[in-house]
């Protein structure tokens, strides 16, 4: 079945994937394209509507990204968002200028004419802005349909050609009625049917994997987390025994991690799972290293080497599969060369070393965590896997602040196990996004058994989130925090103080390193 496709042209915005995700929430098939994609290709892909994403550049800057102008001749509806509306205006004969005041954050949108785009919405909305330019003159055929405090042309429309532009971001949670605006564009303007589902995504992914891999073999790093587990299940369903999973014991795992993973996948799912015990190699290379970026890079490089060594016993593989998700991608590098700010590097993002013989297979690269969970459920994975909390690729290596030693790792493992037990016992584990402990390289004075102690501090981090792009700390009941603190201090030798992290993202990230 060939689906109607909504094309999202990517101009480098960190919200581009959120747009595509919102469209899929409306049960409509969406696909992200490089902004240079030709109109001919979009037509070939059965595109029935085009969305021009936001982006960090200014349309006034020489060399800023532009779409193929023939996109406007396809005869399909077009919606420009933020940078996209400025492109739409400028390329069709309007004028863009620098704003006297940059609009960032919440703004008040006043709707003058509802038309097709704002149908069913109130006359005023709180919306989320992020722009420094604005339209100063409309192209021929357009009229103003909405405005904000600093932008007279916050919403524009050419109903005849079905071209629309909005200066704010309807795709983010901060915008009131944002999903309704997108639904109006999809249903009333593009005429899309609600015929896209997670089952369809699974079928398409399996088909793409088979076409990509052919008769070759695939090597996948299985961590036991949601991402790698769903990737493994998806690839295994597509190519069966052509997949070999390698579980790398890097010495940075949680308590009993290796045993649990091997038991689940090797015995219950009958997957070809090999264990590479390389903890000594990782810890040796990390000795004395304190900088978090250096840690990540050392762990990533060593991880790749272990994979290459695994080939000797496996007999060769052409593809290396990874459970890379979109939040990993947009925090690390730009997609397809589009400009985006780097926040932190991820060990499984950014391609492979030049000397590596693998081709990369990343079937989850376009998905957010909640979509991966839904896909895992569709594939029949058990709840304890599908709803397991995220765990960073570098493992406890980025949860031990400062230099890493076996002693610090053991302290952290025990503390983290206690937190996990208490979260499960309190029926909170599956209700939050992430809960974990962080080892702090700080020693404080304490009193235990009438004796002075001088031991380490453990921080507890519990956050709620929808997609890891933003997060807020959880207001955990005090009695739960009290039990966690008492148990860690009493049961973990070397800890005499527990603190609770009440930072949100932004400004902090979820992980400490």
Image (cartoon, rainbow, N blue to C red):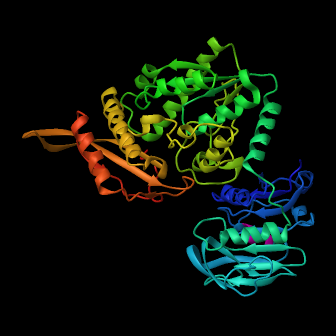
Main SS of the magenta part reads: helix
Q: Relative to residue 95, is residue 442 drawn left or right?
A: left
Q: Image quadrant for the C terminus?
A: top left
Measured as percent of width and height from the top left, residue 58 is found at: 68, 66
Point 52% across, 36% down: residue: 393
Quarter where residue 437 is shown:
top left
The front one of 409 and 282 is 409
Point 65% across, 73% down: residue: 177
Magenta stretch: give its range. Answer: 84-88
Q: Relative to residue 162, is residue 455 drawn left or right?
A: left
Point 54% across, 36% down: residue: 225
Magenta stretch: residue 241 in it? Answer: no
Q: Relative to residue 256, is residue 105 drawn left or right?
A: right
Q: Relative to residue 192, is residue 444 drawn left or right?
A: left
Measured as percent of width and height from the top left, residue 117 is found at: 77, 76
Quarter where residue 205 is shown:
top right
Point 58% across, 54% down: residue: 341
- Using the rendered image of the protein, determine whether residue 511 is visible from the camera's viewpoint: no
Q: Is residue 441 above or below residue 183?
A: above
Measured as percent of width and height from the top left, residue 443 is found at: 22, 41
Label total for image: 0
Furthest residue toward bottom: 112
- Using the rendered image of the protein, determine whether residue 79 is visible from the camera's viewpoint: yes
Q: Is residue 97 above or below residue 382?
A: below
Measured as percent of width and height from the top left, residue 281 is found at: 45, 20
Quarter where residue 313 is shown:
top right
The front one of 272 and 289 is 272
């Amino acid at each position: 079945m060939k689906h109607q496709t909504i094309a999202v042209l990517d101009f480098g915005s960190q919200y581009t994937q959120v747009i595509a995700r919102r469209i899929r929430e409306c049960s409509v098939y969406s696909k992200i394209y490089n902004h240079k994609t030709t109109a001919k290709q979009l037509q070939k892909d059965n595109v029935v509507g085009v969305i021009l994403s936001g982006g960090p550049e200014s349309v006034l800057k020489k060399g800023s990204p532009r779409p193929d102008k023939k996109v406007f001749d396809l005869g399909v509806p077009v919606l420009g968002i933020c940078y996209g509306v400025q492109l739409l205006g400028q390329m069709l004969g309007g004028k863009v200028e620098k704003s006297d005041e940059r609009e960032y954050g919440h703004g008040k949108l006043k709707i003058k004419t509802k038309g097709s785009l704002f149908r069913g919405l109130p006359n005023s909305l709180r919306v989320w802005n992020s722009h420094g330019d604005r339209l100063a003159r409309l192209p021929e055929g357009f009229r103003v349909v909405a405005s904000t405090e600093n932008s007279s042309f916050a919403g524009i429309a050419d109903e005849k050609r079905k071209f629309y532009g909005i200066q704010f971001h309807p795709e983010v949670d901060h915008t009131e009625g944002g999903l309704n605006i997108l639904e109006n564009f999809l249903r009333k303007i593009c005429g899309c049917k609600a015929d896209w589902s997670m089952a369809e995504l699974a079928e398409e992914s399996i088909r793409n994997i088979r076409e990509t891999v052919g008769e070759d073999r695939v090597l996948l790093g299985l961590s036991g987390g949601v991402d790698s587990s769903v990737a493994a299940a998806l690839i295994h369903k597509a190519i069966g025994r052509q997949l070999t999973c390698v579980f790398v014991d890097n010495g940075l795992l949680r308590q009993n991690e290796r045993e649990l993973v091997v038991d689940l996948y090797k015995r219950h799912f009958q997957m070809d799972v090999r264990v590479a015990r390389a903890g000594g190699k990782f810890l040796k290379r990390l000795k004395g290293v304190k900088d978090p970026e250096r840690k990540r890079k050392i762990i990533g490089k060593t991880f790749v080497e272990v994979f290459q060594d695994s080939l000797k016993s496996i007999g060769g593989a052409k593809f290396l599969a990874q459970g890379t998700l979109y939040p990993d991608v947009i925090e690390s590098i730009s997609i397809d060369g589009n400009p985006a700010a780097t926040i932190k590097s991820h060990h499984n993002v950014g391609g492979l070393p030049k000397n590596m013989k693998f081709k990369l297979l990343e079937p989850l690269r376009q998905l957010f965590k909640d979509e991966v969970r839904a896909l895992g459920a569709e594939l029949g994975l058990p709840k304890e896997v599908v709803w397991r909390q995220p765990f960073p690729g570098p493992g406890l290596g980025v949860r031990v602040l400062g230099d890493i030693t076996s002693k610090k790792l053991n302290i952290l493992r025990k503390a983290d196990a206690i937190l996990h037990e208490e979260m499960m016992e309190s029926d909170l584990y599956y209700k939050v996004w992430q809960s974990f402990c962080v080892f702090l390289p700080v020693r404080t004075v304490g009193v235990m058994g009438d004796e002075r102690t001088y031991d380490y501090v453990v921080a507890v981090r519990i956050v709620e989130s929808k997609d890891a792009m933003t997060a807020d700390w959880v207001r955990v009941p005090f009695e739960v925090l009290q039990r966690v603190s008492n148990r860690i201090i009493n049961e973990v030798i070397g800890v005499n103080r527990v603190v609770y992290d009440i930072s949100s993202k932004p400004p902090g990230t979820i992980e400490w390193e």
